[in-house]
Amino acid sequence: MTINTSSSSQAHQESEFPTWRPPHPATSSSSSRSSSASPTPSATTTRKAKPSPPLDLSNYPNGEKSLSGISLRAFLIGTTLGLSTCVTLFFAFLQPTPLWRVPFFLASLSLFHFLEFYVTAAHNTRYASVSAFLLSSNGWAYNIAHGSAMLECLVGYYFFPESRYYTLNIEDTSGLKITLVLGLFLMALGQVVRTLAMAQAGSNFNHTVQVEHQEGHVLVRNGVYAISRHPSYFGFFWWGLGTQLVLGNVVCFVGYALVLWRFFSSRIKREEKFLVCFFGDDYVDYKKTTWVGIPGI
C-alpha cells in the first residue's frame, strides 16, 4: 500500500516537472531555433576570429610615415606656435619693444610648417609622411638661414642704436614703417597663395620634382594655377622676403632674395623640362598664358 502510494506520488511529480533532456537538432524546428538563439559552448569555440587589418610598416617608429614621429613634430610645432604667439602679443602690446618681431617670425615659421603637413594630409594623403613637415628635408642651409634672420634682428637691436638701425626701414610722415606693413602683406599673400596651390593641385602636388609621369597626374589650370604656373614657389618666395621686412633685416633680406631666386630659377627650369615631356604642347600653350610671379624667371 505504501509502495503504491509512493509510486503514484513520484509519477505525479514527474508529470508536473518533466525531466530535462538535451535537444536533438534534427527532431524539430523549435529546437533548432533554440540552439541558434543560444549557441552551445562548442559552437562558440569553433567560430573563427576576424583577421587583424594589415599593418603598414612605414607607420612604425623611424618609418617614412611614422605615427610617433608625426605626433611628436605636431606637438612641438603646436607648442612653439602657442608660446611664440603669446610672447609676440606681450612684447607688442603689454611691454612694447621691437623684439616682438623675433617671436612673431618664429610663430609664422611654425604655422608654415604645420600647414605644409596639414594640407598634404588633407588633399594628398598618400604623401603625408614625416618629411611633409619640411622641417629637415630642406637641409642644414635652410635652418641656418632662419637662425641667421633671428640673430640679425637681435644684433641690430642690442648692438646698434635703435634710431640708427631701424631707420633703415622706410617710414611715412606719421612714423608708420612702410616696410613693416609691406612685409606683413607679403607674408599673408605668400602663405595664402602657397596653401591654396597645394590644396587645389591635390594629388598632383609634390614637394619634390617628379621625373616620371605618375598615373593620374594631370595638368592643373584652375584656381591660382590659372594665373601662375608655379604658385607654391611664388608663395614661398614672397613669404620669405616678407619675413625679413618684418624683422627689419637688411643683410638677410638681400641674402634671402639672392638664395631664393637662384634656387627657384634652377628648380623651375628643371621641372618645366619634365612637364613639357609629360604634357607636350598642352604645357607649352599653358606656359604662354601664365607667369611665375618671381622677377626674372
Image (cartoon, grey):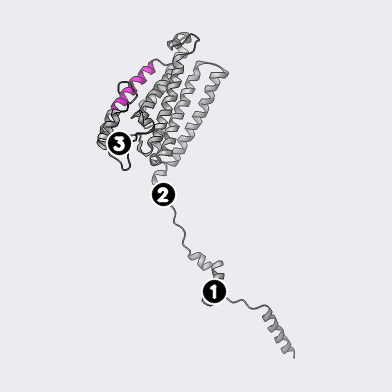
The image quadrant of residue 112 is: top left
Quarter in which the N terminus is drawn: bottom right
Distance in Å between CA atoms under marks 1 and 2: 44 Å
Name the residue beneath numbered marker 3: 210
Examine the image and state in which quarter residue 265 appears: top left
Q: Name above or below for residue 275 compared with residue 9.
A: above
Q: Depth-wise, is mark 3 or mark 1 nearer the camera?
A: 1
Judged by its main secondary structure, the magenta piece is: helix
Q: Position of residue 164 (x, y in %)?
A: 45, 8
Q: Amino acid at mark 3?
A: Gln
Q: Which residue is mark 1?
A: 29
**Which secondary structure lies at badge 1?**
helix
Count neighbours of disc 3 (C-alpha within 10 A) and say few if under 14, some if 14 to 19, many if 20 or more. Answer: few
Where is 194 relative to 50, above or below?
Answer: above
The magenta region covers: 249-267
Q: How many numbered marks are there? A: 3
Mark 2: secondary structure: loop
Which residue, given by chain and number where applicable, does mark 2 sit on?
55
Query: Taking 152 as reference, is 123 above or below it?
Result: below
Mark 3 and mark 2: span between their CA atoms?
28 Å
